[in-house]
Amino acid sequence: MTSTALRGRAWKLLEMVTTPLLPSDYLDLVSPLRAGADLRGRIEAVHPETGDAATIVIRPGRGWRGHTAGQYVRIGVDVDGVRLWRAYSITSPTDRRDGRVTITVKAIPDGKVSNHLVRRARPGTLIQLDQATGDFVLPEVKPAKVLYLTAGSGITPVMGMLRDTEFDDVVMVHSAPQPQDVIFRNDLHDLVADGKLRLIELHTDTDGMLDIARLDELVPDWAERETWACGPAGLLDAAEKHWAEHGVPERLHTERFRPGVVVTEDGGGGEVTFSTTGTTVDADGATPLLDVGEKAGVLMPSGCRMGICFGCVTPLKAGAVRDLRTGEITEAEPGVLIQTCVSAAAGPCDIER
Amino acid sequence: MTAIDPTAHLTAEQIEELGRELDAIRDEVIADRGEKDAAYIRKVISAQRKLELVSRGVLLFSIFPPAWLIGTAGLSVAKIMDNMEIGHNILHGQWDWMRDPKIHSTTWEWDHVSPADQWKHSHNELHHTYTNVIGKDNDLGYGIMRVDEDQKWHPFHLGQPLWNFINACFFEYGIAAYDLELGKNLHKRRRKNPEFRARAKAVGRKIRKQVLKDYVIHPLLSGPSFLTTLAATFTANLVRNVWSHSVIMCGHFPEGVQVFERRSIKGETRGQWYLRQMMGSANISGSKAMHFMTGNLSHQIEHHLFPDLPSNRYAEVAVKVRALFEKYELEYVSGPLPKQVFSAWHKVFRLSLPNKKPKVKTPVREQELIAA
Ligand code: FES
């Protein structure tokens, strides 16, 4: 018998010893970060970055498979006793010696998780982790010239890239309301001082929003650069248009934190059944099914809660749902998965939860 | 139906007002639920697991009498904790708000031969909705006993003290049979019903696992202590069964608790539903430790009013609920464990015999119905 088969047998035997619990229920008591456990992390430090942003240093469990610069991670944090999942960009380089990873979080108004992490999280706290994911990443072949176009907390995935891979010719155009709002300002200025980065820092409170047409003047060779852009939807929409108009859309890579939500007409809504748990509730056509389920006490997976991380995908077994961003209707078919955080009932439907 | 309806003095408006006041109590707790409560249940779960581990560890040496005693006591307590404060309450969804998949009513499984989902149906849905309604709530005597004068007497009931005793010793099996509605389903065609068969299979699987664990694997692991460990786990299961049976009997059986007729719940309002829960349940008074070991089912009245509020909150809720009982001049049935257990058993014995004398008075509610 092979050693894995042997281990499988041993595990089966252990399960007989611990039934109805699992051996891991006991092991979790002593070693929650061990290999083979559900992936978790321990917060080891919280460093303030600006008045409303902080970097959280996390020691991931043994099952952590690492990340690629620019990716994000879903984390589950208990806020006031309730486990909430969100996605945050990883801001540490991929080769950090101590194996820790960092995320950098900006507290958004009424943001339960972001405010908790920035202002209340304490070292020692266990959090739930998912493997890093996302395709807003650097290519394997180094481009000759790079442009990072960022605004606000859109700098976080790019900081992960900046810290990870050095390029010969990098320009960054970053917007924030005021100098003190610029996350990583010191790090950026250090990179500039070392000659590793050309930085164009715009302060929108005094300079106004970046007009994408000004790029010609700020970075004359922008069209030749491989560009990574992250920030509010307005900036990204303008950039996509601009790059397309100049015939170089393939040079632009974007990451959206807050996709615009299209308010859909003709109401929709209906009776939603969460068939696994046998819960049935009425839902309107504007409330995300994720919220509908959570309110009904159904255990719903989630992450960013805004349609980017796919941490909430769930089979749609019957009925139809409407995508709150595009208004698009999806009908149930075998194998159809929906993102519950950006889908609302478009009539009666059955969600497998 | 007791001869005199103890709620007859309340007007319909008063009953609705009572309902609103109870809703307010509930809302207050929900608004305040948070980190501390979550920490509480996590602590209890972790303590239970450690206690079980240590006890089982000690039992490996149960050939030595002191080890047997300590291990058996520890395991009994661990099993009681698992079933009462943890299992019963999690399966009620009391901790679902934490959104922790490991502590959720849809994922939890307990050290009990009745699978969690079957128990949730018969207990949470049937018993908690139709509390003490004759013919609808099978918890009333578990279908094998007569627990109210209004139930018809049958010679079979002569043996009910014995049935109740046996049920106490093998309570978890009794519950499993009851969740399966075994009596009803063993008849003729029903036995072949695929749905019933699937559920019976699930129970069989669970029994096999539990028996294997308690009576084969752990004794085997104990080597020379095989027999003593076997005796220890048997004892722990017996203790757990008798204890939970006693606690549960105290919830609805003691004297002073009302039962209701099927027709009395037709078109029941929220206020009336609350009132039925209040009159249909009884508490056990005692120390904090006592409340903990009963899984806070000592606060049965509060639990029946708010089955999904976290159990650690029942004590504070009880103060307010009791004040409402006083305000509305209702009897809050409560007493220390020995008294309540005695009262419940007394009833079991008394009702094993036919009613002594014909009822003098028709209950008020029935009079009204007849008049209507
Ligand atoms: S929660 Fe991230 S896509 Fe739905």
Image (tube, coloured by chain):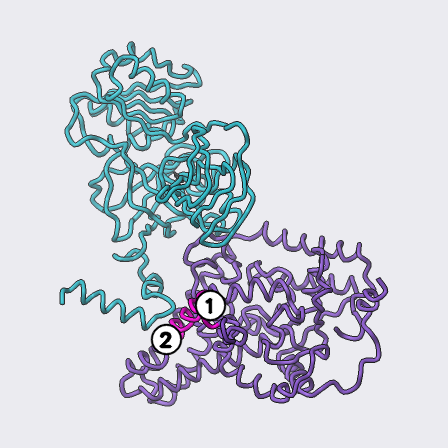
Chain colours: A cyan, B purple
Looking at the image, residue B260 sits to the left or right of residue B341; the answer is: right
Numbered marks: total: 2
Q: Is residue B157 magenta?
A: no
Image quarter hosting the N terminus of chain A: bottom left
The amino acid on which the numbered mark 1 sits, given as a three-letter code, is Asn
Q: Which residues are magenta?
A: B191-211
Question: Closer to the camera, B14 or B335?
Answer: B14
Q: Label 2: chain?
A: B
Ligand 1 within 8 Å of the CB at mark 1? no
Looking at the image, residue A87 sits to the left or right of residue B291; the answer is: left
Q: Are marks 2 and 1 on the same chain?
A: yes
Q: Label 1: chain?
A: B
Badge 1 element: loop
Q: Position of residue B194 (x, y in %)?
A: 44, 66
Q: Visible in this render: residue B360?
A: yes
Residue underneath mark 1: B193
**Number of the label disc, if any, that sits on residue B208:** 2
Q: Position of residue B318 (x, y in %)?
A: 65, 64
Q: What is the crowding at mark 2: few (fewer than 14 residues within 10 Å), some, or many (at least 20)?
A: few
Looking at the image, residue B76 sits to the left or right of residue A280; the answer is: left
Which residue corresponds to the image point at 15% horizontal and 64% vertical from the top-left? A3
Residue B256 occupies quadrant: bottom right
Looking at the image, is A35 positioned above or below residue A307? below
**Disc 2 or 1, which lies upstream in sequence?**
1
Q: Position of residue B283 (x, y in %)?
A: 65, 71
**Number of the label disc, if any, that sits on residue A321:** none
Farthest residue toward the right?
B371
Q: Visible in this render: residue A147?
A: no
Q: Position of residue A334 (x, y in %)?
A: 36, 44
Which residue corresponds to the image point at 60% horizontal and 64% vertical from the top-left? B128
Which residue corresponds to the image point at 33% horizontal and 22% vertical from the top-left? A174
